[in-house]
Structures are given as structure tokens and as C-alpha cells.
């Protein structure tokens, strides 16, 4: 079956219209977490400004149906290999971990409330795979990578996978210490405090462009750090967008809008440099994003009147869901292709494309044959670039793990075909069968109406496409969970706004932070919490809070509604002991009191410990801040629990961080 698939794809390639010009330069700009509605390409935003992306679109073709995986590393691996994550096995953002794992694997057990197991992701690409950079490098191309990699550390960095240059040579999931210098990259020193990493990456890319070997065509990867966590931006830009924010709108984070602005500025710098070099007619420019917009992390912001509020990072409306999820908000992304002499300026295409299609399409751009024996799932969309219609055929998305982002679904695979999208959720039907969601995207872009029960024949037809692909690509699939306990399963939690940050009403009157001070968070969702001036992430068993030196940092929750007094409990550990504190605000208070309304606590360095801190809350608690001890070592939090007064014990709230995919519970 595999051989049949490879032969079919090869036939598609040789029948694509020949391209007269060869050996074009390739500039591949990949944004990080930029959602479909985060640019002005589709007229979906009144807050963000992306004039340079619009300027790029005016030179070429905008794709309104461009897709990626809902998580970064799988998309990046697919661009480099032309393979679907279901085939190459990298299905989670785990490539920064030390462990080297080249294949996916599935267990048969999990928590008792889950019906299926998770698939354990590969953490590295198989070194034998002919990456796009290797193929072009072997064909005489100069190759350079700038920005985020997140496909592995040495010996799996960009330098080992086909690039001559890799700056800043960083393997992590985001910028190492934030967007504004000082940084801590071993091979890249800042020029001044406050320098923006995106400005610097554009500068380094332009320097390489000017100093390159001009006898060779080139591949430039400019994979932006923006707009991934930790969230922060130039203070003057935050101030600018703070004045534009309209409270109540879906997009209302001035910090994030400022981040989008810097991303767009970098795109403009590259366009200007290519023009200045006189190579615009010889250079293909592709702009893409690695997944949908982040709607599960939150930021504490200040509006123009000085009122404090917590908001989701962005909104993908009218699409459902966001980063991490298999719905359209997680997988549909902005995309522009400028192919001189081929794409019509300021044109648009409704043809569906996917990130793994870039591999065969780019190779076709420069008249290079595909590596022999290398299975490719991507489809050459050259006809679409010529302005022709084309049927891409079925397109598969694979997310084989339990998530905890808004509109999340358990382990699933989807297929897009024609106007239809079918999602198979493994073993979540009755009696261990699969569950299905069927949408007609032309009529229902928001995936609001599940038509599976109305069109059983369509479900059967599309599900056969999924099954045939699983067999052809030898996909590792989730297995039934042998630990499943029906008594602990809550079917109402599937596919709803579970575990994500809901936008609360504004918190009025809080003391404004210093003008332009960036809010910063990181991670896969804080279960209703947000972070300020701290880097937050998940490891295998806890929430990890890292406090920058000299910063007043905290995690905060403004969604509490419980009568005081309360007992604050948590299970924590840290290598070094220290003193932290908890600050609170009640419904009757417009701001956090400066004195007398906080409670300190001490942590002993070493093993896990459970702390219980009584808080003398007088009234209804609505907003709480947890300030970790000021120390270089991170703070690990297993769980947090807040118990109200004894008269209403049913109001207890608990957030369990032991598994990043476990939703907050309310008892």
C-alpha cells in the first residue's frame, strides 16, 4: 500500500505544468502561533496592524484555506520532510527535550477518566530523512536558518539537518529568556538592553543575505519567534495598542498586538532587503504560520483608563478553537506565496493547501526531483499558483493526545475532502467504538453543527479515507485505555470550553503596572491562571514557574468567586527555600490594598511539601496573586486548592497541574 501511494504522488508531480525558470531563491518565513484572524489579510481584526504582510500579499497569492498542524514542532517537521505528522511521528511539541526518540509509540493505559491512551510523540526526526534543506544543499544551494527551530538540539540542530548557518542556534520552544534583551543565547549577544529578538533576527538574516555567495541560489529559513510565549513586546508599542483596544471585542490584548506589530516589521525588513539586493524577480517568498492562534493562555493587562483586566491572548473567531486543537481555529493559518512570473499580484486562491505541501511544491519550483524512496504526503500545488483550480484530494490532521485547550477533543484524526470535514475521536464512542463529528465547512465555517447522525453514508466514506491512510502510512494510533472507569468519565467535558482561559469581566481600579511593562507567560494553558513577569511551563508532573532576576513576578487568578475567609493550599517543591506571599482582593475593593492584605508563607528547599495558608478574606474573594520566592531556582507546583469558609465547603476549587492536560476541577 505504501508503494502504491508513493507511485501515485510521483505521477502527480510529473504531470504538473513545467516551470521554465529554475533555481529560484527561496525565502520561507514561518510565524509561530499566528492565527488565521491575527492579520489584516482577511479583514478579521480591528486591533492588529500588518501592513507589510499585506504588502507581501500584493505581490503574490493569498491562500484562504491554508492549513498546518495545531502544534508547532509537528508542522515544522512536516515542512522539512513533506510528511504528515502521522507518518513521521512527531505529533507533540517535545523536540526540545533531552530524550531522543525517533518513532511514535502507543501505550494502553491512562488516567481512569479517559477512554483512550495517548500516543507518545517522537522527539527527533529520523536523521536519514532527506530534509528540504539537505536536498537543496546537495543541489548547490546556500542554506541559512534564523530564529526558532524546535526540531531538536545537537546533533539534530539546523546545522545537522541541511543548513550552513543557524542563528541563534537555539533548540527551545520559544525565545530563551524573552523578546527584549538581555538575552542568554550562548552564541548571540545583545547590542543593547531592550533590543528586540525579532529585530535582531531580521538584521542577522539581512547581513547573511548581503554577504552570501552570490554564485549560488539560496534557501533562507526565517522562522520567527513571534508570537509565541513568553509574551512581551516593546513598551512603546504596548502603549500604542493600549490606546486602540476596545473592551468587549474578541481581541483585546495590547501586548499581543504589539508582538504582531514586531513580527510584521521583520517581514517588511526582509522585503526591503530583497528589493535592495535587486533579487526580487529571482526570489520566491513564502509566508506561513505553524498553527492557529493561542486562546488558552491569558495576560493581565491595563487599559487606557488604567483599569486592570485579564484577557485571552487572541481570538480565532469565526473559527472554532485554537492552538492545540483539531478544530479549524487550531489548524487554519494565514499564508501568502510570492512566486515571480507565476503568481498573479494581489490574487487569492481557495485551493486547500497544507504545510507538508511546501516540500514538493518548492522542489518543483526549482525543477528538482523528489528523493528516491522517500514517502511524501504533501501535494504539489503548483497549478493553484498558476491561478488554476485543483483538487488537492483528502487532507489529514492528526492529534493523538488529550488536550486542555478551549474546544479540545481527545485523541483524534480528521480528514478534509471537498466541502466536508470528518473528525474521528479514537474509542470515545459507545462500547469502545470511535466517535465522529462531521461538518460542512462551506456552510458552517465555525463547526457549530455536527451532521454525523444526518449523513451516516458520508461519515462512512470519509472514515474509510482515514482508515486507508492509517494503513498506508503505518500510523501509530491510540489504543483503548485499560484503566478506563466509566464512573469517572464526564462526557459533557468533551469538545467544550474546558480547561481554557475564559475572558472574565474587567477588574477595575487595580494599580497600573509601569507604562509599557510587558506581561509575560509561557506554557500550554494555566487552567484559568495567568502570569506576570514570569515564565511558566509544564513538565511531566507539575507547573514550573521561573522568575526573572529582579522581577516582581506572580501568577494570578481573577475568576474566583467564594466567600471568605479561605484556606489556600498547594503542593510545591523547590531546590532552595524561600519566602513567598499571597495577595488578594475582594468584590468590594477596586484595587489591591498596598498594606495589610497579604499573607506570607515559607517553603523549605528539597522534596515535595504541602502548604496550607489561611487567608483572612473579609467578604467575597474574586482575585488572588501568588508571588513565588525570589530565587534563581524554579518553583514546581503540583496542585493548588482554595477552600472557602466551613459554611459552604461545596465551593472548594482545585487546579491539578500534575498533567498539563488535566482540566481544573470544581467540587
Image: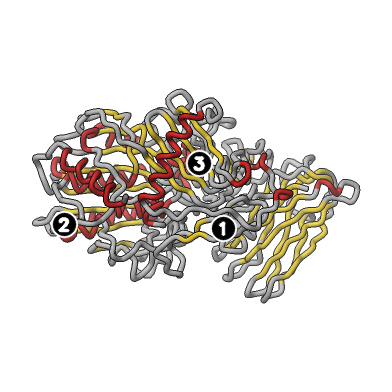
Residue 448 visible at all: no
Q: CA distance from mark 1 to mark 2?
A: 39 Å
Numbered tag placed on residue 282 in the rendering: none
Near mark 3 (Cα within 10 A), the count class, few <14, some 14-19 or many ≥20, is many
Q: Are marks 2 and 3 in contact (CB under 8 Å)?
A: no
Q: Nearer the viewer, mark 1 or mark 3?
A: 3
Q: Secondary structure at mark 2?
A: loop
- Write down the residue under mark 3: 424
Q: Is residue 49 above or below residue 455?
A: below
Numbered tag placed on residue 536 in the rendering: 1
User: Which is nearer the N-term, disc 1 or disc 2?
Assistant: 2
Near mark 2 (Cα within 10 A), the count class, few <14, some 14-19 or many ≥20, is many
Q: Is residue 519 above or below residue 45?
A: below
User: Which is nearer the N-term, disc 2 or disc 3?
Assistant: 2
> In the image, residue 180 lies at what x, y percent?
44, 56
Left or right of residue 367, residue 598 in this image: right
Numbered tag placed on residue 141 in the rendering: 2
Q: CA distance from mark 1 to mark 3?
A: 32 Å
> In the image, residue 454 lies at what x, y percent?
54, 25
Residue 37 visible at all: yes
Q: Are marks 1 and 3 in contact (CB under 8 Å)?
A: no
Q: Secondary structure at mark 3?
A: strand
Q: Residue at x 69, y 47 (%)?
A: 489
Say which of 436 and 32 sits in front.
436
Q: Nearer the viewer, mark 1 or mark 2?
A: 2
Say which of 507 and 105 sits in front.
105
> In the image, residue 101 lies at what x, y percent?
42, 66
Amino acid at each position: 500500500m505504501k508503494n502504491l501511494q508513493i507511485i501515485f504522488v510521483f505521477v502527480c508531480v510529473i504531470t504538473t505544468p513545467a516551470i521554465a525558470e529554475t533555481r529560484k531563491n527561496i525565502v520561507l518565513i514561518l510565524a509561530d502561533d499566528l492565527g488565521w484572524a491575527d492579520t489584516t489579510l482577511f479583514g478579521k481584526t480591528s486591533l492588529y496592524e500588518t501592513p507589510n504582510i499585506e504588502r507581501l500579499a500584493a505581490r503574490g497569492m493569498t491562500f484562504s484555506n491554508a492549513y498546518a498542524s495545531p502544534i508547532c514542532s509537528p508542522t515544522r517537521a512536516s515542512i522539512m520532510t513533506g510528511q504528515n505528522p502521522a507518518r513521521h511521528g512527531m505529533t507533540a511539541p517535545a523536540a526540545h527535550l533531552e530524550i531522543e526518540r525517533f518513532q511514535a509509540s502507543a501505550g494502553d493505559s491512562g488516567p481512569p477518566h479517559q477512554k483512550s491512551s495517548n500516543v507518545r510523540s517522537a522527539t527527533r526526526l529520523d536523521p536519514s530523512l532527506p530534509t528540504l534543506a539537505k536536498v537543496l544543499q546537495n543541489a548547490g544551494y546556500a542554506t541559512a536558518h534564523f530564529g526558532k527551530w524546535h526540531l531538536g538540539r545537537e546533533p539534530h540542530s539546523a546545522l545537522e539537518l541541511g543548513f550552513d548557518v543557524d542563528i541563534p542556534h537555539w533548540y527551545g520552544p520559544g525565545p530563551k529568556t524573552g523578546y527584549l534583551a538581555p538575552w542568554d543565547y550562548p552564541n548571540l549577544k545583545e547590542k543593547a538592553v531592550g533590543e528586540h529578538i525579532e529585530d535582531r533576527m531580521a538584521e542577522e538574516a539581512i547581513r547573511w543575505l548581503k554577504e552570501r555567495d552570490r554564485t549560488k541560489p539560496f534557501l533562507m529559513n526565517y522562522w520567527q519567534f513571534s508570537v509565541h510565549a513568553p509574551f512581551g513586546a516593546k513598551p512603546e508599542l504596548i502603549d500604542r495598542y493600549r490606546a486602540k483596544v476596545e473592551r468587549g471585542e474578541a481581541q483585546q490584548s495590547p501586548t499581543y498586538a504589539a508582538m504582531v506589530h514586531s513580527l510584521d516589521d521583520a517581514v517588511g525588513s526582509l522585503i526591503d532587503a530583497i528589493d535592495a539586493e535587486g533579487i526580487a524577480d529571482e526570489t520566491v517568498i513564502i509566508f506561513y504560520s505553524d498553527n492557529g492562534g493561542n486562546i488558552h493562555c491569558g495576560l493581565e493587562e491595563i487599559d487606557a483608563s488604567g483599569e486592570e483586566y485579564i484577557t485571552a491572548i487572541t481570538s480565532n473567531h469565526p473559527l472554532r478553537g485554537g492552538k492545540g486543537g483539531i478544530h479549524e481555529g487550531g489548524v487554519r493559518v494565514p499564508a501568502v506565496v510570492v512566486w515571480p512570473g507565476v503568481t498573479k499580484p494581489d490574487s487569492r486562491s481557495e485551493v486547500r493547501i497544507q504545510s507538508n505541501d511546501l516540500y514538493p511544491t518548492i522542489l518543483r519550483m526549482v525543477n528538482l526531483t523528489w528523493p528516491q524512496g522517500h514517502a511524501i504526503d504533501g501535494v504539489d500545488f503548483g497549478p493553484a499558483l498558476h491561478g488554476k483550480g485543483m483538487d488537492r484530494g483528502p487532507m489529514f490532521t492528526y492529534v493523538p493526545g488529550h488536550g486542555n485547550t478551549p474546544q479540545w477533543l481527545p485523541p483524534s484524526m480528521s480528514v478534509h475532502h471537498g466541502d466536508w470535514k470528518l473528525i474521528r475521536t479514537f474509542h470515545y464512542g459507545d462500547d469502545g467504538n470511535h466517535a465522529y463529528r462531521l461538518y460542512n465547512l462551506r456552510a458552517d465555517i465555525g463547526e457549530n453543527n455536527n451532521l454525523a447522525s444526518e449523513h451516516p453514508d458520508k461519515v462512512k466514506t470519509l472514515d474509510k479515507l482515514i482508515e486507508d491512510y492509517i494503513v498506508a502510512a503505518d500510523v501509530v494510533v491510540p489504543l483503548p485505555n485499560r484503566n478506563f472507569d466509566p464512573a469517572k468519565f464526564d462526557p459533557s467535558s468533551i469538545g467544550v470550553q474546558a480547561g481554557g482561559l475564559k475572558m472574565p469581566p474587567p477588574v477595575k481600579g487595580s494599580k497600573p503596572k509601569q507604562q509599557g511593562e510587558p506581561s509575560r507567560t509561557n506554557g500550554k494553558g494555566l487552567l484559568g491562571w495567568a502570569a506576570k513577569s514570569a515564565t511558566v511551563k509544564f513538565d511531566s508532573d507539575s507547573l514550573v514557574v521561573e522568575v526573572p532576576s529582579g522581577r516582581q513576578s506572580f501568577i494570578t487568578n481573577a475568576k474566583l468567586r467564594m466567600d471568605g475567609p479561605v484556606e489556600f493550599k498547594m503542593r510545591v517543591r523547590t531546590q532552595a527555600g524561600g519566602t513567598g506571599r499571597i495577595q488578594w482582593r475582594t468584590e468590594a475593593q477596586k484595587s489591591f490594598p498596598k498594606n495589610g492584605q497579604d499573607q506570607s508563607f515559607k517553603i523549605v528547599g528539597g522534596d515535595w511539601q504541602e502548604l496550607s495558608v489561611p487567608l483572612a478574606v473579609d467578604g467575597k474573594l474574586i482575585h488572588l496573586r501568588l508571588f513565588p520566592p525570589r530565587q534563581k531556582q524554579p518553583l514546581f507546583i503540583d496542585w493548588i486548592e482554595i477552600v472557602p469558609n466551613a459554611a459552604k465547603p461545596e465551593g472548594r476549587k482545585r487546579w491539578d497541574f500534575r498533567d498539563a492536560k488535566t482540566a481544573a476541577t470544581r467540587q
